[in-house]
Image: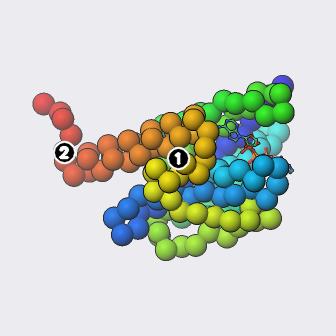
Amino acid sequence: MGKRAAGFVLFRRLCGQIEYLLLKASYGDFHWSSPKGHVDPGEDDFTTALRETKEEAGYDESDLIIYRDTPLTLNYIVKGKPKIVIYWLAELRNPNKKPVLSEEHTELKWLAKEAAKECVGFKDNQEMIDKCQEMILDMDKKKQGGCDCP
Ligand SMILES: Nc1ncnc2c1ncn2[C@@H]1O[C@H](COP(=O)(O)OP(=O)(O)OP(=O)(O)OP(=O)(O)OP(=O)(O)OC[C@H]2O[C@@H](n3cnc4c(N)ncnc43)[C@H](O)[C@@H]2O)[C@@H](O)[C@H]1O
């Protein structure tokens, strides 16, 4: 059976800029990713996303504005087996609240879209960041009353 993980594409707004949180793995190929992790037996994906984000970045559900209606999915192969990762987009309410890392990561970065895409490297992850940016800008437009409705 394949592996299943869940997490949040976590962003903040600082000085008018949208920035994504990326964490550097302390193992393997030292890759960068959003907070996420393995879905435990009997656990639902959303609970996993919250648990892993608390463990890996120190943020609780109350720290986040979560866009729960639009999960995003990545599918790739790890050690010859398929892996699926379900992400929700989430905004940090207080952009100055610092993440607290676990032993699973050695570094963190808050990066604007293009730098974040370069940092994650994988094409599907880059496309997910583009999609997230579109979702954020769309939501902003709607809030400002700038929708295209007749
Ligand atoms: N490899 C490892 N070695 C030693 N200890 C480990 C370990 N992985 C986890 N642990 C440890 O296991 C414990 C449980 O961790 P926990 O976080 O609970 O479980 P997990 O399933 O290992 O969590 P993740 O899904 O976050 O693991 P990951 O970072 O390896 O996965 P990713 O898909 O990003 O990355 C997996 C691979 O896929 C690659 N990858 C990432 N994204 C993509 C993509 N979009 N397309 C193709 N390849 C990708 C990465 O570069 C990487 O090579 C922890 O103590 C942790 O330290």
Quarter residue 43 falls in: top right
Q: Quadrant of the N terminus?
A: top right
Number of the label disc, if any, that sits on residue 98: none
x, y percent for residue 113: 45, 51
Front in this rendered view, residue 52 or 29: 29
Which residue was labeled with disc 1?
117
Q: Residues within 10 Å of mark 2 (few under 14, many from 20)?
A: few
Q: CA distance from mark 2 to mark 1?
A: 28 Å
Q: Residue at point 13% right, 30% down?
A: 150
Q: Ligand 1 falls in which quarter? A: top right
Question: Which residue in the rendered view is the most extreme toward the left?
Answer: 150
Q: Residue at point 19% right, 47% down?
A: 145
Quarter residue 42 falls in: top right
Q: Is residue 150 above or below residue 137?
A: above
Q: Residues within 10 Å of mark 1 (few under 14, many from 20)?
A: many
Q: Residue at point 69% right, 58% down?
A: 24
Front in this rendered view, residue 140 or 122: 122
- Tell me which amino acid carries mark 2: Gly
- Tell me which amino acid carries mark 1: Lys
Number of the label disc, if any, that sits on residue 146: 2
Q: Is residue 102 above or below residue 77?
A: below
